[in-house]
Structure formats: structure tokens, C-alpha cells
Amino acid sequence: MLTVEGGAALPLNLYWTADAPLATEYSSFLHLVDDEGHRWGQSDNQHPGGYPTVRWRPGEYNRDAHTLRVLPGTPPGDYTLRAGLIVRTTGAGLDVLDERGAPAGTSAAIGTVTVTRPQQPPPVEALDMPHHLNVPLGDLTLLGMGLDRQRAAPGETLLLTLYWRAERALPQDYSVSVQVLNKNGGIVSATILPLAAKFYPASEWIAGEIVQGQHWLTLPANLDSDAYTLRLELLDISTRPVGKPVSFGQTGQVTVISPERHMAIPSMEYRLNTNFGTRATLLGYDLEPEMARPGETLRLTLYWRAERVMTRSYAVFTHLLDADSHIVAQHDGLPVEWSRPTTGWLPGEVIADVHLLDLKADVPPGEYLLEVGLYNAETNVRLPVLDMAGQIVEDRALLAPVSVEP
């Protein structure tokens, strides 16, 4: 296990080998992440191995030197080291394949790094805070905050970063309530979060320590188009407010653009009515062309109906399978080209979700199957398909066969 102080640099070497000649130039990356997917350090290399990847020879090892820089104020604890490759011209990640040859994300976990408390707190300027606040709150000072964007849709998740300094050893475990206010000052949602990280409670902090916390903040699904403001309250161990609420003002303002919603069920070529984990129903789909040729693109339109408000964002998978269940074409991602996360669906809403599956020029003629479903992108666990009695019968919906002609 590797160990590094918060704010320090960790030298690491990766070793790559090409399985076949490469026609694409790739860059490599290392990310240090926690269990919730927050990134606490990274290193990038435009020329892994010291020269362009198109010059890698199959079977030869290429040493890829990195210096992973851990963010100042990273909460002490164990983190996962993930590595991957991206296409230099587009920034697209190269898929990591599972045992079936199916994509399982664009990075691979390669080890664990323990981050320890630094001997001296970092200087405030080293935190690179987007917005300085310097608000005293009892035993703490809220030094600043950051928000990854200020325009979003209902149900989208924002990244909120808070920067703290303990003015003395903390006598208890504090938490924070992050509230979303409408233009009249009314609270439309409130989320209770740990001060920085659940694995590093405030009671373990020492006097003078500086810690930053990264938090996912999901906006309510039912928000109307308008401007909303974030506000923070420090809570004691009994969840009672400590001090006055801190409004982030313009720096914490989020403009929400609500999508046009449809409740009526449209006409569709194929009807299914497949229930995925009581969360959503795949009502049916359209497919064109039904008889395709190598090199063509299948246009698959899925019609989903939300059955309840979802607190987790699920991705859609669409796989074209051969007779041996190998994937020959696919399109995965959040619904409607990443613009309609399931956390923004309202019960009864119908969502038309288009997926384009590109057939390779050398795909053999024959009959193929389309499998479709929803899965947790963080764990790759699929939502189950339920029968009328609520019993699990599958983890996918199989669509009508697709013929590929020569």
C-alpha cells in the first residue's frame, strides 16, 4: 500500500504493452478517487512511454512515468488509484472491457493510496479556492467554496467543494445542511452532508487543520426554470444549527432550465411494457432500419416512463449481440445524450431516448439481438426486470431480432 501526505506529490510508474499495432495516439492518466467518485489528485501524460503510442510495438513494455499530486486539504484516509487512456484528439476515454468484452468504464482500479495528515497545514493560497468567504462558525472557519457550474437541469448533480479550518480541536462531529432556496427565499430542498468526508469525522481534526470536502448535490426533479441560491448551515451532533446560515450569494446561484415534459404515451412501432426495478418502465421502442448493412447505423428510440422519483442516476445500455452473446455494436450513457438523468424524471413522465449503434464495416451478415436496460454507472449493477408479481425475471429487455445483410 502506498502512503502520501495531503498536498504532496507521489511518483509512480505505469507499464503498458500494445496487443496490436496502434493507429491512434493516446494520453494516459492517473486519478486518486474516493468511494463516491470525487477526485483528489491526478497526473496526465501526453506521451506515455516517452513517445507517441502509434510507435509502440506489440508485446513490448513501455514505462509511463507520473507524478501524482494530491490536493491540499485532502481528508486523511484510503483512496483508490485509477488509470486509463484517452484519445488525444477528442478526449474520449478508452473502454476497459470485462470478461464478456463489454465496456466496464474508462478507467481501471490499480491500487490503494493512504493519504495522511500533513505535518503542517497548507497555506490558504495553495487551496486555489474559486471563492473566498472566511466566515467564522463556532470552532471552525469556512474559508471558501466552489461550484462546478451555475447552469443545470432538474435532477442534475452539482459538485460543491467546501474549504474549512479548525480553529481548535473540535469537541464533536459537525455536519452541514446545504439548502436550495427559490427567489423568494423559500427552502426547496435541504441535504445534510458530512463536514468534509464521512470517513474523516470532524472530531478527528486538530487545531489549525485545513480540510476540504467535495460533495455531490442533486437538484430536485420538480424544479421549475428559475434562478436558485445555495445556503449552508453548520449543524452540531444533534443537528442543531451553529451560528447563522451562510448564503453563497451570486457565487452559489444556479440557473435551472427545466425540460419540456410529456405525460402522454406516443405511438411506437414495438410495445413492451417492461418494468425495471419499479423505477421505470420501458414502454416500447422504434428501430430503423430493421434490416441493416455493414457500416450502417441503427437508430433505436426507447420510450421510458418514470414510475417514481429516483435518487440515483441510472445509465442506459443498448447492446447488439451475436449468436454467442458477444457485443458487436453498442451505445451506453445517460438518457437523451446525457441531458436527462433519471434523477430528473417525474412520475408518469414519458422520455423518448435515442441511441445510435454504429455497425462496423466487417460485421458478418446474420441475425442479431438487441439487449437494453438500466444500470448504476458507479457499480455496473443492472436494475432487475420484474414480472407482474414483482419477481425478478431478468436484468435486461430483449428486443426483436435485427438482420444484417451482406
Image (cartoon, rainbow, N blue to C red):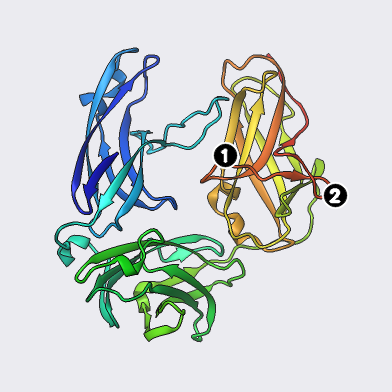
State the quadrant of the N terminus.
top left
Give x and y (percent) for residue 321: 66, 25
Residue 189 horizontal side relative to residue 293, left or right: left
Which residue is found at the position 80% from the left and 46% from the top?
A: 391
Checking the image for residue 110, the label placed there is none
Is the residue marked by circle 1 packed among few (<14), some (14-19), or many (20+) residues within 10 Å? many
Residue at the disc numbered 2: 389
> Is label 1 in a helix, a strand or a loop?
strand
Q: Is residue 346 above or below residue 355?
A: below
- Foreground of the two, 297 or 68: 68
Give x and y (percent) for residue 260: 64, 63
Q: Is residue 294 above or below residue 167?
A: above
Give x and y (percent) for residue 303: 72, 48
Residue at the disc numbered 1: 332
- Foreground of the two, 376 or 79: 79
Q: Amino acid at mark 2?
A: Ala
Residue 357 horizontal side relative to residue 163, left or right: right
Residue 48 horizontal side relative to residue 391, left or right: left
Q: Is residue 151 above or below residue 141?
A: above
> Is label 2 in a helix, a strand or a loop?
loop
Disc 1 to disc 2: CB gap under 8 Å: no
Q: Amino acid at mark 1?
A: Asp
- How far apart are the alpha carbons under marks 1 and 2? 29 Å
Answer yes or no: is residue 173 visible: yes
Q: Is residue 115 above or below residue 398?
A: below
Q: Quadrant of residue 107?
A: top left
Label 1 vs 2, first from the N-terminus: 1
Give x and y (percent) for residue 49: 24, 24
